[in-house]
Amino acid sequence: MPVLTAVSALAAGAAVLLCRSRCHSLRSNAQLAKTSGAGNDESQLCEQKRPNIRNAEKDRPASCAFAERVASTAKEAYLLRRPLAHRQTVLASILALRGEELFVISFGVGTKFLDGEAISHRDVVRDLHGEVLARRGFLRFLHEDVLRCLSGEEAELVEHNGEEGCKLRDDVSLHLYTSSVPCGNASWKRWAKGGSTCSHVDPNSPLWPKQMHPQIHFHARAEGQAAFLVKSESKELQAMNKSIGPLPVGTALFQSELGRREQGPLTCSDKVAQWSALGLCDDLLSAAFAASTPRLASCTIGRKFSWPHAARALCCRLQGFHRGQMKELPQGYGLQHLDLFGCSVKLDDGVYEDGAGADFTEHRCLVWTRGDEAAEILDGRTGLVAETGAISRISKLSLTELASKWQEFIPAKAKTELLKSGGRPTEKQRDFSHVMYKTNVRLLEEKDAHGWSLESLVCFPRYILVLLKAR
Ligand SMILES: [Zn+2]
Ligand SMILES: [Zn+2]
């Protein structure tokens, strides 16, 4: 059978070649005919039929050998663990570098999300973009690793941190890979010249080239330069943008916490920016990492990478978010810039015909966590496991169940804090939220219902505060 397939593939290839060369000669004839003023029906027919075949991904340079290693390791895990093949999708992955060993902790594949109604459902996965699925897959691993650590087993990424609970091992760093530029602000190729390199790199850094991010000058805030956006398929919401230029495809302005239910989830650029500012933990895990939350060290991007735009979107936008400028910020929070790289490794090595493009009919998304035999298939229309309708292993509900397993082992001090606050924010955090809340309300009063968001987007949306409160 494989022989037959190979033979038919060869035959098909030969046919394409024949057609191409025939078309080529006919085209030449057509050109000749055109110059001589005569028509040629056969050449026109062939022109119409000739498919415009191009590479699925453009050739592009890699920033460094480390980025290539990250991309190819992520791709390898995906090819090995995927239960189905996608066309034209987004793969994202979180990898760990432990000593010199680089391995995949999780990956996510998908381009779907659910609209507002599902927001309060703890059993439904609302945001099924690759980056978000990869992070949730990572959280699942972290819950399991914290349990290993606190219950006295050997953990893979974390270690004891005395009374503070856990911390990332000193020889471990975390790295994000995404096969295409994250949606939202990073894909907004405005307000900076493109380019694939950072101009300030430490050539002596041993594991990967460490970068120094220059201060951004926000000269176009009112145009949305620092804006937080939401994923949106609603033409009405997308058009609800009176004062700033065309938004990136598939996004709408973040309106506020007040209108959260009607909006889609924040774009992946905004979520990565939050992880840069607050770390990767969810509210449950942050109790186990009281002193230092695990953070991403770098981000490697495949298609459409542009360093200045990625830097703006994924970290530098929040350059004022540190305790030097914001005294109210709780210990351990504040921006940590990401080392940002492009890679030449292509997720899709194939070719396709123009017009085929992304496959929007594909609703199935994938999420895999280290230790799983195969990736879980989720239905992008329901946020549940495809076909069975079961609750996903990465849903809030499932992660809460995992947390309950390690919470009994949590050190006394951290436990007291947890009980004292009863899951509510500490006084300091409440103050901080209050200041920001007042700021938002003031802006809301000053502006009309849809225009007020511009200023609030400049600083930090309430999403960040919600995370802080949960801490
Ligand atoms: Zn996205
Ligand atoms: Zn930065």
Image: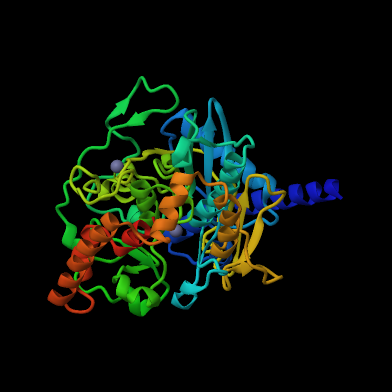
Q: Is residue 183 in view from this perspective?
A: no
Along the line of sight, the residue nearer the viewer: 282 or 277: 282
- Residue 2 x %, y %: 83, 47
**Is 55 above or below relative to 337?**
below
Spot occupied by residue 429 in the image (x, y as percentages of width and height): 29, 56
Q: Would residue 103 be found to the left or right of residue 279 on screen?
A: right
Q: Where is residue 323 in the image (x, y as percent from the top left)?
A: 23, 44
Inspect this view and state whether residue 52 appears.
yes
Q: In this view, does 302 lie to the left or right of 426?
A: right
Residue depicted at x 20% and y 41%: 215
Residue 451 to residue 6: above or below: below
Point out the quarter of the image occupied by ligand 1: bottom left
What is the tally of numbered marks visible in this picture? 0
Color theme of the render? rainbow
Quadrant assignment for the C terminus: bottom left
Q: Nearer the viewer, residue 56 or 281?
A: 281
Please state which of residues 272 and 407 is positioned toward the viewer in this rendering. Answer: 407
**Which residue corresponds to the image point at 32% horizontal and 25% vertical from the top-left?**
202
Q: Is residue 125 above or below residue 283?
A: below
Residue 101 screen position, x and y as percent: 57, 28
Camera-nearest residue between 25 and 424? 424
Left or right relative to 153: residue 466: left
